[in-house]
Amino acid sequence: PVLVVDFGAQYAQLIARRVREAHVYSELVPHSMPVEQMLAKDPKAIILSGGPASVYEPGAPSIDKAIFEAGVPVLGICYGFQVMANELGGKVNKAALGEYGKTEAVVDKAEGILADSPAEQTTWMSHGVAVEEAPEGFQVLAHTEGAPVAAMQDESRKLYGVQWHPEVKHTVLGNQLLFAFLHECAGLASDWDADNIIDEQVGRIREQVGDAEVICGLSGGVDSAVAAALVHKAVGDQLTCVFVDHGMLRKGEAEQVRHDFVEATGIKLIEVDASEEFLTALEGVTEPERKRKIIGEKFIRTFEKAQKEVLEEAGARGKEVKFLVQGTLYPDVVESGGGDGAANIKSHHNVGGLPEDVKFELVEPLRNLFKDEVRAIGTKLGLPDNIVWRQPFPGPGLGIRIIGEVTKDRLDLLRDADAIAREEMAKAGLDRDIWQCPVVLLADVHSVGVQGDERTYGSPIVLRPISSDDAMTADWYRLPYDVLATISTRITNECRGINRVVLDCTSKPPATIEWE
Ligand code: XMP
């Protein structure tokens, strides 16, 4: 693989993704991993990410110099570039001029990572520290006003560094630089695609699971469906899927799973109605993180209980179910604080929401991937479009779309409103264009309305249509006014207790997609 060493950057996962876009396999590793362990992965190239620290400050993260002496091509980006320069004897200092955002770089030598570059490039920078002098043996390739050395390389040792961020789209020729490093400098071929990911994961799953029984919690969403199909390809009938009705599903969810998924895949499916237990556990709970933790724990307990039935179905009474498959994606891991040094934004039910005493070993074949990659794999595995292109729906379901306590009545109300919104968006032919549209009930908020000459004091429904590529960032989707109008009229007419429909027009960041 190409290893992306994470120094706590916001963009580390973006680098890994760009490498995959070059059809080269990549993996993210924390900078705290010992270098021997990194080299044991037999990397074909290494990229050092940016990070928030300053190399010359005490305690700033660094990396064992051995990494530069292993004969593996290394590209340092921003902080990673400064670490390289510092470790190899260059001069790194507080910059006379910090550069944040759009910056013009002057290319002194259009070679190596800057092969075929024009004499000037528009780049995106974020640094207050600069490399003043390159280490011995390095050639300076570019400079900017604030960075005397903005790009450098030592062809003989295959070491490369750049101050700007080639991984962000604002750096116009960023991909060209990354591709030059991967293909020209490191000599890697473009041979990584959905087929490879499938083959590699099938191999890993077989190795992990052996001949043990596996269950997979199916939510009806894309991720768990693709994860299940992958595991099924790997271990066939050792897999049983469990569809848990936790009472917070949308209208028609169970039927859809039965119909689309089972028919398309032939995978064994057990259905469990655990709605009472989930709702009882959520009584009186309003705090979002507590909701998420309770739901995460209940899922696990439900799978534990389903174990007996799974074994009976499998005809393997007495044996245990050792593994639980989850459709965890990369953004779930990062947002749950799973990236090295990353903050916990919210505990995704299948990562941070899990209890500590999980008896199952987890199988998470999609853990390093983004949603669009998962969709490509799903299609390759032969899943139908109506599964692969379904809008994302979070595991905790409508439970995190009721702001306030989750009760049966509120769920019924929200379920109706949600069904109307989805129906109208589909009718307008927008369901594939819109990434997803959470419909949220502000259950504890009341406002005055007038309906049928009567005063009402009801709750608002929020529509949150968004567009996105990978759910890491999102913009609010400009839903046409007439579609908004139809949805609003229908919801207020058909859902008793709702007297107002409002539109959430916030991007992510600053907001997240779901309200909780
Ligand atoms: P946020 O709200 O963090 O959501 O911007 C990003 C994407 O993840 C979905 N989401 C979840 N999916 N379990 C899931 O399976 C969860 O606990 C969870 N929380 C959020 C959300 O719908 C959006 O697509």
Image: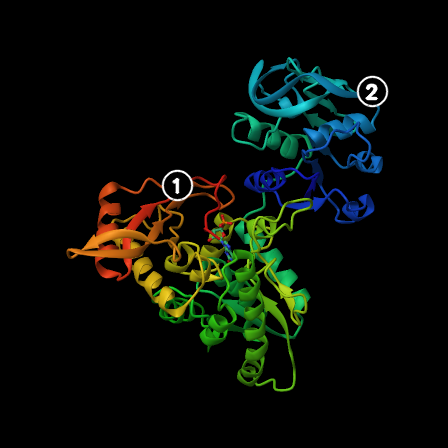
Indicate the quadrant where residue 258 lies: bottom left
Identify the image's colour scheme: rainbow, by chain, secondary structure or one colour.
rainbow
Label 2 belongs to which residue?
A: 136
**Does residue 270 show up?**
no
- Quadrant of residue 385 within the rendered picture: bottom left
Picture residue at 65% right of the left edge, 69% below the top: 358
Label 1: few (<14), some (14–19) or many (≥20) C-alpha neighbours in 10 Å:
many
Q: Nearer the viewer, mark 1 or mark 2?
A: 1
Up/down of 272 relative to 372, above or below:
below
Amino acid found under the numbered disc labelled 2: Glu
Regarding residue 348, the answer to whether it shows in the image is: yes
> Where residue 322 appears, x then y in whole percent?
65, 74
Res 476 label: 1
Which of the two residues, 308 or 373, is positioned nearer the viewer here?
Answer: 308
Q: Is residue 56 above or below residue 309?
A: above
The amino acid type, in three-letter code, at marker 1 is Trp
